[in-house]
Image (cartoon, grey):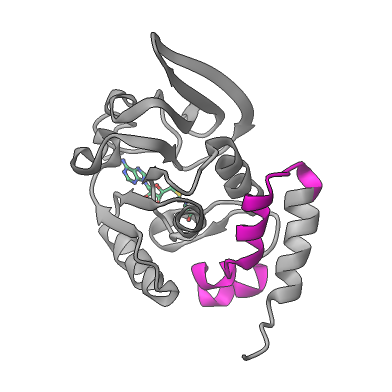
Amino acid sequence: MARDPYKYPRERMLEKHIRGRGIEDPRVLDVMAQVPRHLFVRENLRSQAYGDHALPTEQGQTISQPYIVARMTELLDVHSDHSVLEIGTGSGYQTIVLAYLARVVYSLERVPNLARKAIERMRLFKLDNVKIQAFDGTVGWSEWAPYDRILVTAGAPEVPRPLLEQLKPDGRLVIPEGDRDRQELVVYDKTEDGFERHAMEPVMFVPLLGRYGWREET
Ligand code: SAH
């Protein structure tokens, strides 16, 4: 097999920015040690693919910081029999991480061009458990509902109702909630009599735009 020039940067990312910052879940660490993140960033940014930061993608969107991807994945607590809905495919990096952990992943991206590129990237991985489509994810994806887990990777003013409704009993949803440019990572657990809400750390995501999200700027 050809030598992977990104093996060392990836190991360094794992030690310093992920394990070093408190991520312990062995399944999350294992997946992030394997997924070639450089294939998800623009060619001229590949040398920065394993740095401790988000990077710009096409259409003014971003691929999230590796630590944040790891943290959200850990909080989501994905098991191998789970069906997962992801809102905000973006580059598809987080989608792939979820796909290695879950039974099946459904991912929605608002920008058709990003969805198309992410679908092309998925082909490289020869995974048959990922479905990506382009539409407003704030309304969820009723076709495959209910889901064991839902992950939103864009910042919402508040959790979209349809997403809570598409969660299974005992299901979990992770979402950045707050202002347009600054949010808190929030975990919702569906219980017998409603939801438990736990706010975790501060985060910064691009806005979740759509019917139950922020209004698009005109
Ligand atoms: N997880 C991604 C991060 C994507 S950034 C990655 O690691 O690459 C957030 C993404 O959410 C953007 O691509 C943006 O276009 C998308 N987005 C924003 N509002 C959305 C909505 N209502 N439905 C689906 N995707 C949305």
Residue 1: within the magenta?
A: no
**Viewed as shown, does residue 208 lie left or right of 96?**
left
Q: Quadrant of the C terminus?
A: top left
Q: Position of residue 59 (x, y in %)?
A: 38, 59
Q: Residue at x 58, y 21 (%)?
A: 199
Q: Is residue 126 above or below residue 191?
A: below
Q: Residue at x 69, y 50 (%)?
A: 26
Q: Residue 124's image quarter?
A: bottom left
Considering every residue shown, the one lying at the far front of the view is 81
Q: Position of residue 216 (x, y in %)?
A: 29, 38
Majority secondary structure of magenta residues: helix
**Viewed as shown, does residue 36 lie left or right of 154?**
right
Q: Residue 21's image quarter?
A: top right
Q: Is residue 41 above or below residue 187?
A: below
Depth check: 192 or 65 in front?
Answer: 192
Q: Is residue 76 above or below residue 115?
A: above
Q: Is residue 37 above or below residue 183?
A: below
Q: Residue at x 18, y 42 (%)?
A: 143
Range of residues picked out in magenta: 20-48
Depth check: 77 or 57 in front?
Answer: 77
Q: Residue at x 57, y 59 (%)?
A: 55
Q: Position of residue 151 (x, y in %)?
A: 44, 39
